Image: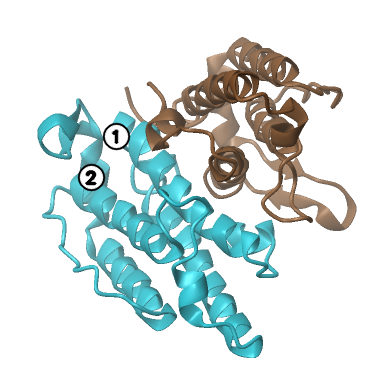
Chain colours: A brown, B cyan
């Protein structure tokens, strides 16, 4: 199997979002066991002007969704940010995984030759092809939010390790 | 330019390690300006049993070095962990960048077909080819430590944003 737009995106998102979902399970059980108010974790931040855990997870999932949609040349599905608890976040991840698995593999491969635009107005950014978009923009952003979600929980005492983040593949 | 082992590794490491180096510059200036003891940042951790900033940077750089060496089929250079300050860390990153640029591109591409073994003893892990190694092990590990380095500085009040992490490419 050669390196391809598909292999560098969908299975990677599946791995890390799967890890994140399992980590959220652990966080919920931990909160339950220690009688911690779930919102104390879901709204925890590393600094006042950073996103809290809940938003970090939403944004990580959105990078997976947006990346696969743009590479595949299909419309980015719009998910409202309505989640308020761990179960909601796991559902959001599940919905995201179902979506990225629904985009045809050959459409994603064709993304290598697709011009891609993200953002609007002053934040608009254009990529001449899917490769720089995936490797230099989408994946760094995705990992940034996924790791920060992990770091927030670790900072709040959840007993997880890097193995939980890397997950299985 | 098609997606390849080289394009998914060396330029990505260069982008993020370059960002990290610039962020360390900002951290050093910030410490200087605010009369913060540099070790207060370099030894900062998000939790007592996590690596401090200094070690996160060393490990991130080591993932870049080890990945490119293993993909390229050359010996992993051994760098002693002697850094104690910001200048040392930037030097470590510079040395790492010079090394990854020195491995011939075609040797890295050939890594797609190379069997790769990491770790020793109970922690040994084998990959049937360079692709799962790069996409599912090396890059997640690299981003994990690079993002956590950023998160530690952000948590300690350094005024940086995601833009500093994504950097230029």
Residue A121 point in image, percent of width and height = 89, 53
Residue B40 point in image, percent of width and height = 51, 74
Question: Who is closer to the viewer here, B161 or A136?
Answer: B161
Instruction: Identify the chain of the residue marked 1, using the numbered disc in the image.
Output: B
Answer with left or right where residue A89 lies relative to residue A106: right
Residue A151 visible within the image: yes
Q: Residue at x 77, y 30 (%)?
A: A39
Query: Do residues under tags 2 and 1 come within 8 Å of each other at their CB atoms?
Result: yes
- Residue A151 vs B169, above or below: the answer is above
- Residue B158 vs A1, above or below: the answer is below
Count the labels in the image: 2
Residue corresponding to mark 2 = B71
Decide: few, some or many residues near mark 2? Use Cα within 10 Å; few <14, some 14-19, many ≥20: many
Quadrant of res B80 = bottom left
In the image, farthest residue toward the right: A121
Q: Residue at x 24, y 66 (%)?
A: B102
Decide: few, some or many residues near mark 1? Use Cα within 10 Å; few <14, some 14-19, many ≥20: many
Residue A69 point in image, percent of width and height = 69, 25
Answer with left or right where residue A40 lies relative to residue B62: right
- Residue B14 vs B27, above or below: the answer is above
User: Mark 2 against mark 1, which lies toward the viewer?
Assistant: 1
Question: Who is closer to the viewer here, A41 or B97?
Answer: A41
SS class of the residue under badge 2?
helix
Residue corresponding to mark 1 = B133
Q: Earlier in the sequence, mark 2 or mark 1?
A: 2
Answer with left or right where residue B146 lies relative to residue A89: left
State the separation of the CA atoms marked 2 and 1. 9 Å
Q: Residue at x 74, y 42 (%)?
A: A52
């Amino acid at each position: 199997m050669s390196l391809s737009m598909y292999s560098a995106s969908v299975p990677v998102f599946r791995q890390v979002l799967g890890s994140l979902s399992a980590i959220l399970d652990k966080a919920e059980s931990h909160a339950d066991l220690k009688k911690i108010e779930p919102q104390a974790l879901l709204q925890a931040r590393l600094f006042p002007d950073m996103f809290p855990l809940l938003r970090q997870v939403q944004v990580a999932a959105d990078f997976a969704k947006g990346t696969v949609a743009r590479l595949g040349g299909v419309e980015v599905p719009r998910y409202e940010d309505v989640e308020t608890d761990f179960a909601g976040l796991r559902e959001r991840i599940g919905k995201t995984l179902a979506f990225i698995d629904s985009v045809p593999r050959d459409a994603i491969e064709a993304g290598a030759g697709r011009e891609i635009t993200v953002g609007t107005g002053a934040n608009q950014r254009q990529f001449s092809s899917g490769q720089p978009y995936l490797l230099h923009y989408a994946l760094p952003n995705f990992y940034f939010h996924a790791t920060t979600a992990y770091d927030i929980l670790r900072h709040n005492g959840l007993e997880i390790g890097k193995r939980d983040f890397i997950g299985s593949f």
